[in-house]
Image (tube, helix red, strand yellow):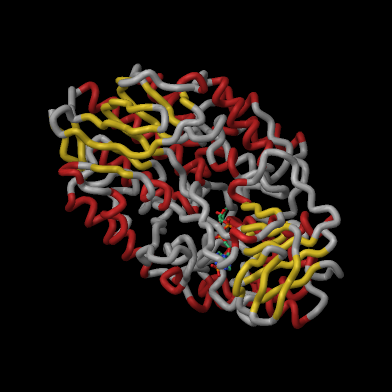
Amino acid sequence: MSITHPVRTDVVVVGAGFTGIYMVHKAHELGLSVVGIERGQGVGGTWYWNRYPGLRCDVESLDYSYSFSEEIQQEWTWTEKFPAQPDILAYLEFVANKLDVTKDFRFNTEVTGAQWNEQTSRWLVATSAGEIDTKYIVWGTGILSTPKIPNIPGMDTFEGELLNTATWPHAPVSFAGKKVAVLGTGSSGIQVIPIAAETAEHLYVLQRTPSYSLPARNRPLAPERVAEVKARYGDYRAEARSSMLGAVTETLDQPFSVMGEDLARSELERNYEYGSPMRFASAVVDTIADDDANAFVSAFAKAKIRSRVNDPAIADKLIPDYRIATRRLCIDTNYYETFNRENVTLVDLRDEELIAMTPTGFTTTAGEYEVDMFILATGFDAVTGTLSRLDIRGRGGASLKEKWSHSPSTYMGLAVAGFPNMFVATGPGSPAPLSNVVVSIETHVEWIAGMLARLEADHVTSFEATAESEQEWTAHVNEVSDSTLMRFSDSWYTGTNVAGKPRVNVVYLGGCAPYEARLKEIAAEGYRGFTLTT
Ligand code: NA7
């Protein structure tokens, strides 16, 4: 659909994922005109693009869903413990239709930039289908929306099928009878590898850094369990919202030094048997804060990996040597068992370096491999990557990309000094990446809507986070991060998976509930830390 321009609106919402759908709905409730922009053909966001076989969310379905509408949570019924991608996509389509927001989105449309106009106090948003003049802009572009494409020499000469988990084809992909390589062993690789191994003639797993993974123990949700949660969904959601991770974890909430080894072991075992990364990581509450706690939990998880792999030499290669949970803790279905198969080879890129791709496969320092299909499961330029690729210009023509190239600083993970009337939902410096992100999204969208209501009621023409409030918040985010073991980790949490990105933890590790309490205080104090201009 093309936009007749110039379109004038109150709010532009970019992205039709969990954030965009809810934000457009909130704009309706506020009586504001709204235009949604989405580059995909439909709603779904990351769940629209990532559709590789085996893809599931690692947060349980009863948690990974909107809580704001009792009607929606009662009408929709999840069927599995961990929701599969087609189910999440169907859910988001259901919600978007129910809320009647689909009509407000321009699909197949890309935002290329946005410019703040100081004379009019409005944004001019440039899209592939024309410009939009808006008072407010809300970026709902998500934290995992720009794939990281590795720079492998000769990649463009490969004559087989080159696929990326993050932009998986809509048409079915068959591994049957093919020689397949998967590069990357994060959450995406770990999910697709066992499925590919089932039918591929041969599978090569190219691993540079092993992940810690736990059995997901995915299963159909018992109707009684669904009914039980639905009967008290309000309380269940409240418990999730008032937790550190935005999900019910049933943790004893005790540090290792208080628990002692026996209790710590039995709690780890209980949560390992349950199968949930959030519950497992919360079993010993100071796992990412205390080295002794972490060493104990790491040793537990390493022993579990060893028990799943027949060949001890291969197990050694699959066992990580970093502190558990300081990178994403994964869940899997038969991941480690896949390496017991005859048709699977682990190519450890720490032993043999990946040199190049060739027309027929790839070469490492150990030799040449022929494959028909090469799958990139190499992750994302996370959190800041999407907005840093756009030409976003704030006050005085300042560039967001330029600003974030030094430090991805924000006020409360949702506003940026120098960029008035702009919100970045789940931005850097929010708890989103390590939380049940739907809770983080609801927290942000509801807070943004509250602020918009206040701004409109008071005839405010523009708002902007002050430089001081941004500096203070960013310093606090860094201080909390530096007090944890995450300071030692390299991953997309710290930006170190992408060459040239500043090494800064993009996650606020202070927890969802304390974070939301702080947001509420800021609102109650008349939006402390913002300058409001009438
Ligand atoms: P991740 O977790 O960032 O994993 C990417 C994987 O790809 C990881 O094993 C990387 O190894 C590997 N990788 C990336 N680039 C290269 C190159 N150039 N050579 C070799 N290996 C490479 O992304 P996922 O998509 O799996 O998961 C992202 C999030 O989605 C996940 O955290 C959940 O929140 C859901 P490296 O660590 O760089 O050595």
Q: Give the image location of residue 313, x and y in percent.
A: 75, 82
**Can residue 331 be spotted in the picture?**
no
Q: Give the image location of residue 432, x and y in percent.
A: 45, 49
Question: Relative to 447, is 194 on the left or the right?
Answer: right
Residue toward you, 289 or 357: 357
Q: Residue at x 36, y 69 (%)?
A: 482
Q: Which of the 4 quarters of the picture holds residue 474?
A: bottom left
Residue 221 lies, with reference to residue 501, above or below; the image says: above
Question: Relative to 230, is 239 on the left or the right?
Answer: left
Q: Give the image location of residue 84, x and y in percent.
A: 69, 43
Q: Which of the 4 quarters of the picture holds residue 486?
A: bottom left
Residue toward you, 52 or 237: 52
Counting labels gives 0
Q: Which of the 4 quarters of the picture holds residue 478?
A: bottom left
Q: Give the image location of residue 485, x and y in percent.
A: 45, 71
Residue toward you, 293 or 427: 427
The quarter of the picture where the C terminus appears is top left
**Can residue 318 be spotted in the picture?**
yes
Q: Residue at x 56, y 30 (%)?
A: 41
Q: Residue at x 32, y 40 (%)?
A: 520
Residue 51 lies, with reference to residue 472, above or below; the image says: above
Question: Relative to 370, is 265 on the left or the right?
Answer: left
Q: Where's ligand 1: which quadrant?
A: bottom right
